[in-house]
Image (cartoon, rainbow, N blue to C red):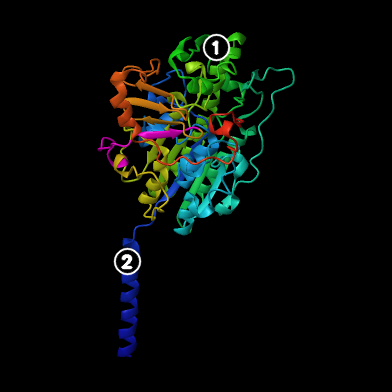
């Protein structure tokens, strides 16, 4: 009997010790990973465009750390997302454009999703995380398959100006795909999880077409719309390689001639407002989630957008408007609500920061640095600029005070961002700025591999490649 008693006591003591050890072992944090498509810096915390209405982006900004100088790896959907998710820059993979299928080039084992799955996470998602044409379902434990399409513009109604597509829709909010994409995220946040989760939610809007219910257009009366800053002769001091990227004759000239520039700006603002609404629905679920106190939130947009600045529309360029976008983090126990970090970073930091925060080994192929120190202290020492690439050997380096662009053919641009935030005056040809260019050029990528579409000498010398939205 005494022996049995001692055995039972031992079992209870072991069970109690195991319970204590289990309680003392920190649970791996979950991740809510929110991607926005084509959203530039027209969000409240930037203070850049006060006519934008973004109450839920502003709400999120007040909950964590927002970055005012965050730059994409590439101002194009597919290469930006491929770089962000793989940890490898376009200049390393050769994925420079939307029409390059990254899947044969970058294997699944290199991806952020795989790092989390290997660490025991449930990895699920909805919407646009990778470029739509190249989704790789094998990377996910579950992915929303039937998000549906958006309603069409009714017959006889104008759908925009040339390739810039916009029109109000007579439909409900829940008839657009983004509503269902948000629903997937909302359900994922509400349910019980038996292991840590990585939940990705990728909104399509404000990607074109800027077609959302009419009520969102009504928030922005045309009479109140202010056009972006623009100089008619802004491209006069831009070298030929930069002018080719701007291609003003394709979008800007037709837009000005149409007299509908303000309508286009109104439509982009309306589409941002619609996106903001769905973000709000997702944030409501995040705040109610039983796992909120142990869930990291990371929100990013794949790149910015021009609406006439430098006589350019869309992305596909290396200036400020195309390369800067919103970037917001919440890390429980680390980030201080309502803070803004002015340090200059790029999105190659996302992969290593998430693995760092979650205690997952960062694969050796990942190029960027963790920004954990900036999340803990937005004023921490930081000397890394943001680097963005568009097509082969065209790069820009952006630090807090300067932007330097070098094109494949050797053309250059240099802007003093403190004195000239609209990048009106190209200083690159002035001898007194040679040292500044050299200082920034040190950060240009060391590798520039050809992409699969560059099959001839004319392509290598800057020939045209087809753009795919």
Task: Establish if 212 lies above or below 104.
Answer: above
- Checking the image for residue 21, the label placed there is 2
**Quadrant in the picture for residue 45:** top left
Mark 1: few/some/many CA within 10 Å (<14, 14-19, 20+): some
Number of residues whose C-alpha sits closer than 10 Å to that of mark 2, classed few (under 14), some (14–19) or many (20 or more): few
Along the line of sight, which residue is nearer the eye, 40 or 188?
Answer: 40
Q: CA distance from mark 2 to mark 1?
A: 63 Å
Q: Position of residue 380 (x, y in %)?
A: 25, 38
> Which quarter of the image is occupied by the C terminus?
top right
- Tell me: residue 264, above or below residue 364: above
Kindly state the secondary structure of the residue where label 2 is placed.
helix
Q: Main secondary structure of the magenta part?
A: loop
Span highlighted in magenta in the image = 375-390
**Residue pictured at 27% horizontal, 39% vertical:** 377
| 42 relative to 265 in the view: left or right | left
Viewer-nearest of discs 2 and 1: 1
Q: Which residue is mark 1?
A: 222
């Amino acid at each position: 009997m005494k022996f049995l008693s001692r055995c039972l006591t031992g079992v209870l003591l072991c069970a109690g010790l195991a319970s204590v050890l289990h309680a003392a072992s920190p649970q791996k944090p979950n991740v809510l990973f929110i991607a926005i498509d084509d959203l530039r810096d027209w969000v409240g915390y930037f203070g850049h465009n006060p006519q934008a209405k973004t109450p839920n982006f502003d709400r999120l900004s007040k909950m964590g750390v927002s970055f005012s100088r965050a730059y994409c790896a590439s101002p194009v959907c597919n290469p930006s997302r491929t770089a962000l998710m793989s940890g490898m820059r376009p200049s390393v993979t050769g994925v420079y454009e939307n029409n390059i299928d990254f899947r044969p080039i970058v294997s699944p084992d290199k991806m952020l999703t795989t790092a989390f799955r290997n660490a025991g996470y449930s990895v699920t998602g909805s919407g646009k995380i990778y470029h739509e044409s190249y989704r790789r379902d094998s990377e996910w434990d579950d992915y929303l398959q039937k998000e549906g399409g958006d309603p069409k513009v009714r017959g006889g109604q104008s759908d925009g100006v040339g390739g810039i597509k916009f029109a109000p829709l007579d439909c409900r909010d829940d008839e657009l795909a983004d509503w269902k994409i948000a629903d997937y995220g909302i359900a994922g946040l509400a349910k019980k999880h038996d292991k840590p989760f990585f939940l990705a939610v990728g909104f399509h809007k404000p990607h074109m077409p800027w077609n959302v219910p009419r009520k969102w257009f009504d928030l922005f009366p045309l009479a109140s719309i202010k056009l972006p800053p623009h100089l008619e002769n802004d491209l006069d001091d831009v070298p030929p390689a930069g002018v080719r990227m701007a291609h003003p004759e394709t979008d800007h000239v037709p837009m000005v001639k149409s007299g509908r520039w303000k309508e286009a700006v109104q439509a982009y603002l309306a589409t941002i407002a619609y996106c903001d609404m769905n973000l709000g629905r997702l944030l409501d679920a995040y705040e109610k989630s039983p796992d909120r106190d142990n869930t990291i939130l990371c929100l990013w947009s794949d790149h910015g957008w021009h609406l006439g600045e430098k006589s350019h529309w869309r992305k596909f360029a290396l200036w400020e408007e195309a390369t800067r976008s919103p970037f917001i983090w919440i890390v429980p126990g680390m980030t201080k609500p309502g803070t803004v970090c002015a340090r200059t970073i790029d999105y190659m930091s996302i992969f290593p920061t998430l693995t760092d925060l979650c205690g997952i080994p960062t694969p050796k192929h990942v190029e960027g640095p963790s920004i954990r120190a900036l999340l803990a202290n937005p004023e921490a020492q930081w000397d890394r600029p943001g680097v963005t690439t568009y097509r082969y050997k065209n790069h820009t380096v952006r630090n807090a005070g300067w932007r330097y662009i070098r094109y494949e053919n050797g053309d250059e641009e240099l802007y003093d961002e403190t004195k000239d935030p609209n990048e009106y005056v190209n200083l690159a040809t002035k001898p007194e700025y040679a040292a500044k260019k050299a200082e920034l050029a040190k950060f240009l990528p060391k590798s520039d591999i050809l992409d699969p579409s560059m099959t001839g000498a004319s392509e290598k010398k800057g020939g045209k490649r087809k753009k795919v939205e």
